[in-house]
Amino acid sequence: MLTSTTHTLQGLDIVEYKGLVHGEAIMGANIFKDLFAGIRDIVGGRSGAYEAEIEKARRIAIQEMCEQAQRMGANGVIGIDVDYETVGSNGSMMMVTASGTAIVYR
C-alpha cells in the first residue's frame, strides 16, 4: 500500500478516488511509565516509554487506515493526516488518528 501526505503522486496517475479512510488507536499509559515519566519531568530528558507508546499507536492507526483502503479496493492512500490527542481523566490516554483518501493509481 502506497501512502503519502501529499495530495498528488509525482509520476503516477490516480485513476480512481475511493473515498475517505481512517484508523484510530487509543493507548493507556500504565502506572510505572507514568512514574518514570514524572521523574524525567523533574530531572529533564526524553521519556522513551511514552515515545514508544506514541510510535506504537501511530503504527496501529496507519495500519487500520490502510486495511480499510485495501477493503475498498484501493492500492494507495494520499493526503494522510495524523493527529494526536490526550483523552481520559487527567489525560491518562493517548489517542492517535490517521485519515486520508483511498485511491487507485497506475
Image (cartoon, grey):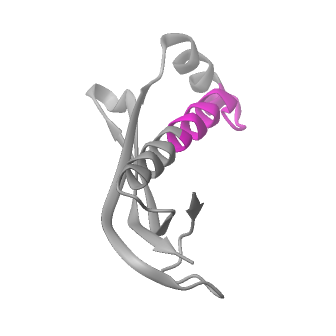
- The quarter of the rendered structure image containing the N terminus is bottom right
* Magenta stretch encompasses residue 32: no
> Residue 53, relative to residue 19: is it above or below?
above
Q: Residue at the far top: name it.
A: 32
In the image, taking residue 69 as reference, residue 62 lies left or right, namely right
The prevailing secondary structure element of the residues shown in magenta is helix
For the point 70% across and 36% down, the residue is 44
Which residue is at the front of the view, 7 or 1? 1
Q: Which residues are magenta?
A: 40-59
Tell me where residue 37 appears, x and y as whole percent: 59, 26
**How many dots with numbers?**
0
Which residue is at the front of the view, 76 or 33? 76
Res. 13 image quadrant: bottom right
Res. 27 image quadrant: top left
For the point 53% across and 70% down, the residue is 5
- The quarter of the rendered structure image containing the C terminus is bottom right
Res. 99 image quadrant: bottom left
For the point 32% across and 29% down, the residue is 90
Tell me where residue 24 appears, x and y as whole percent: 37, 42
* Magenta stretch encompasses residue 45: yes
In the image, taking residue 2 as reference, residue 46 lies left or right, namely right
Tell me where residue 11 appears, x and y as whole percent: 66, 88
Tell me where residue 45 appears, x and y as whole percent: 72, 37
In the image, taking residue 26 as reference, residue 12 lies left or right, namely right
For the point 53% across and 78% down, the residue is 6
